[in-house]
Image (cartoon, grey):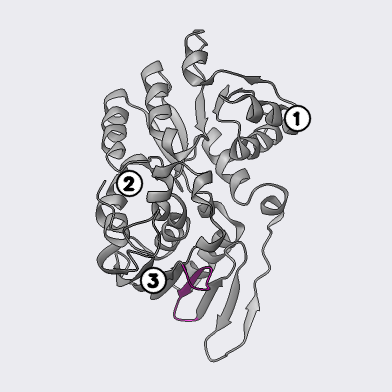
Amino acid sequence: MIWLIGVGNMGCEYAKVLAALHCDYIAVGRGEASATAFESNTGHPVVRGGLDAFLTMGPCLPDAAIVAVGIDQLASTASSLMEYGVRKILLEKPGIGALSEIYRLCAQAKESGSEILLAYNRRFYASVFAAERIIAEDNGVVAFNFEFTEWTHTLDPQKYAPIACRHWLLGNSSHVIDTAFFLGGQPMQISCYRAGEDNLSWHPTASIFAGAGMSDRGALFTYQAAWQSPGRWVIEVLTRKHRLYFKPMETLQLQNIGSVAVNPVEIDNRLDVEYKPGFYLQTKAFVEGDYSRFCTVEQQKEHIEKYYKTISGYVD
């Protein structure tokens, strides 16, 4: 039995996969509107009133829980689940709102013996699996670069919790950053630069980012993002034989050494088309207990300390 906490758009995506995997689950939601929409979209009933009300009913412990609530509720929801005795939790990224919450989560997980995994679904894209095979055949990555420009002209900060806006890089841009370092290695050295502190009132630390470093696999990397300029999410990975392009990230293109032609790589992306990309294999791995590709909450703490703070300028 799985508990699915949160029945908004993300909850609906998880429900679709859980149904396909023939997993029994209980959906728990807070708002009437989201609960009604979930039931209409999935045909599955929702326990209304939120997690705290649900827990007062004394439900039997599930095998695991999936948390798909808003960024401002992620840490508190995971904490409540651990207090109740749930020991396996898939927590939507980035897992926290305020940075200080990551330390409490890690301490509670260690004390209770809980496994908390961050749902960075791009690690499970068909394009990423295909790239890994090419990288292995080419004996590793020698360099990589990535861009995490956000289309801030399309964002209405009124539609999001203030803490989500203040930490937009961690909550949204980390999709790209996490995938790039997953493929190319975690930073051993990194230099970060920021500008545009006055450009966005809801993201006061910066809106222009650039940096470079070396990963623990010996690969050099660079990154950039200018949130009020044209751009998109992009990752490019270089081996001794190929340049791999994720542009967009659901696809993979390849440039051979000695050629300027860039050609698409045929990938079996049927699951990424039928379901929200990455969700099927991510959810399947979680419910089957294969945690090898996941970012743990302890690793997320290390990433925040080692580079997310420096890239973003966040202090709290």
Which residue in the structure is indicated by mark 2? 299
Which residue in the structure is indicated by mark 1? 40
Are discs 2 and 3 less than 8 Å apart at CB? Answer: no
Which residue in the structure is indicated by mark 3? 223
Point 45% across, 69% down: residue: 147
Please tell me which of labels 2 and 3 falls first in the chain: 3
Q: How far apart are the alpha carbons under marks 2 and 3?
A: 21 Å
Specify the segment rendered in magenta.
228-241
Residue 64 showing in the rendered view: yes
Q: Residue 221, relative to residue 63: is it above or below?
A: below
Q: How far apart are the alpha carbons under marks 2 and 1?
A: 37 Å
Q: How many numbered callouts?
A: 3
Q: Where is residue 293? Give x, y as percent.
A: 46, 48
Point 57% across, 59% down: residue: 154
User: In terms of secondary structure, where does tag 1 sit?
Assistant: helix
Answer with left or right where residue 230 lies relative to residue 141: right
